[in-house]
Image (tube, coloured by chain):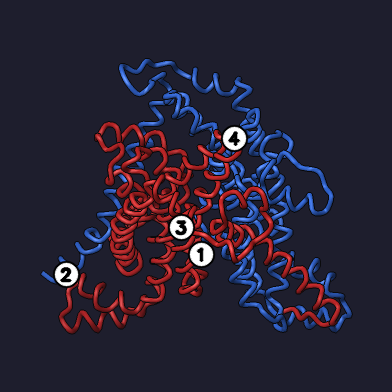
Chain colours: A blue, B red
Amino acid sequence: MRGARRRLAPYVFVLPFVVVFLVFSVYPLIFTARLSFTNWRGTGAAEWVGWDNYTYLLTNPAFWNSLGNSGVLWLLIVPVQIALGVLVAVLLNSATLRLRGLYRVAFIVPFVTPLVAVAQIWVVLFDQGYGAVNALLGVFGLPDVGWLTTSTWAKPTLALLFLWKTTGFIVIILLSGLQSINGSLYEAAELDGASKPRQLVSITVPLLRRTIMFAVVLQTLAVFQMFAEPFVVTQGGPYNSTTTAGYYLYNHITRADLGTGAANSFLLVILVMALSLFFVRLLRAKD
Amino acid sequence: MTDITTPSRRIGSHVFLMVLLVAFLAPVVWALLSALKPANDIIRAPLTFDPSTVTLDNYIAMFRDVPIGQGFVNTGIVLVAKGAITMFFAPLAAFAFAKYRFVGKNVIFGAVLVTLMLPTIVLIIPLLLQMKEFGWVNTYQALILPGSVDAFAIFWMRQVISAVPDELLDAARVDGSGEFGIFWRVVVPVIRPGLAGLAVLTTMNIYNDFVWPVVVASSDRMATLQVMLSTLAQNITGNRIGADYATVTGELLAASSVALIPLLVLFILLQRHFINGILAGSVKG
């Protein structure tokens, strides 16, 4: 009796997860796969259209524009964030640094604030006529910038929001990576007369490579799925300059163009998975 | 540990870190303070703060114009229900993965990993259609059930529970405890710090969730706090005429502040758990 209960128990324990998984992951996934080959608009009968949705997207400049926008945002965000993150993490990891706790808490504040609330604050701060940012530039005698109204500046403004929101989180990840580096390496370098910047380049960065790559993969996934920022701050504009891959996908839903949306989801997942794999390979190749 | 030895370098790093600290705190502090200014001053003098003119007018107008109370109620209901489901069933499943051998374990754990790695957006459209099929659009079920029993929570708690010594479980068995009793009376008390971290992370994720709620529950009655905030912002960008803009901006900042404050307070009270939760959460892909 007891043995039977013990054999049965784990199945009962994992059952809720399995039910949720089957109903809300597997079933919908199969459903999307089929949907992506139809022209269904949410009502009426679905018509089988073969690969039409895929060829429509792959030959559509708007689709490529959305990927291009996400690509540019990636360039504006990820390299800056990693460089800044490593620098800050190294400084915070110093044994003799004062106010370490204060810095750590301050850098995490953006991460715990709700993105939508912050995105709204961004709208007000970066307003061309009334915003605090242009007012601050004015103090230094600099001209107004159309942060949200010109296609040149809209992407950097969104990138800034993303950087502000997530850099503290990257610092925490890198900090945990740093704490696993053996301190005696630095002592040896010190004895050999290596300078601090030299130690950063020759010891810290190579040993932190795994953690850095991990952060890059994480942020690549996040940047290509970016949605709330353009939704709240720019609605994809001006002139579609901030229509990210995630926001473009959402547009199919609002137009009830569900077949195309399903195909777009799959293309995006393939891209994101391929990019992640590429970065993982990059990490392995050097190991 | 690297040391910052020379005094000039030490000063240099503090200057650098202080500049960042100001940049990281400024938008939040600015919003909290500006929400207390007369609406016209927010746009006329965005860089100054005069304590003698502090007013709650923006908050009063916002509470009058925006059903933000309903937003809090909706978010609260989802938070409690979805949070409870995850906080109970995820560690339970994790217990099975960490401490039992059973046929099909690897396959089911594979399902956990797949759920972890699947980008949210791929499921949005089919899930929405499924909700339509169920008649669940604009209901609490739709906000609560998909994504409950969070895969990451299982993944994380499995690691935490693996560290619990098997002897403790066997001792409880000898004492006649049932399998669920072992989980409830032995495992749960031991992993309490991990559960605290999980509670904090789960709260943050549910409170801040936006993509799924905006797709499935955008009606006025069902909008969560974040969904409600997002449409407010669209009003302001679509409506840029002088005085009106000032009023809307004032209300917008008041609404954003009201949404920010609960998590900020929670964070300040539970810093350590937050940072542990975030750190563990970083494993999520």
Judged from this view, the residue extending furthest toward the front is: B52
N-terminal-most mark, 3 or 4: 4
Tag 1 and tag 4, C-beta contact below 8 Å? no
In the image, what residue type sits under mark 2?
Answer: Gly
Under tag 4, what secondary structure?
loop
Chain letter of mark 3 equals: B
Under tag 1, what secondary structure?
helix
Nearest to viewer (mark 2 / mark 3): 3
Q: Name the residue under label 3.
A: B258
Nearest to viewer (mark 3 / mark 4): 4
Which of the two residues, A3 or A24, is positioned nearer the viewer here?
Answer: A24
Which of the two residues, B146 or B230, is positioned nearer the viewer here?
Answer: B230
* Disc ID at residue A3: 2
In the image, what residue type sits under mark 4?
Answer: Ile
In the image, what residue type sits under mark 1?
Answer: Ile
Within 10 angstroms of label 4, few (less than 14), some, or many (20 or more) residues? few
Labels 1, 4: one chain: yes
Within 10 angstroms of label 1, few (less than 14), some, or many (20 or more) residues? many
User: Mark 3 and mark 4: span between their CA atoms?
Assistant: 25 Å
Chain letter of mark 1 equals: B
Q: Give the residue at x 72% y 71%.
A: A90
User: Mark 2 and mark 4: span between their CA atoms?
Assistant: 74 Å
Q: Name the residue under label 4.
A: B241
* Disc ID at residue B250: none
Q: Can residue A210 be seen in this view?
A: no
* Disc ID at residue B278: 1
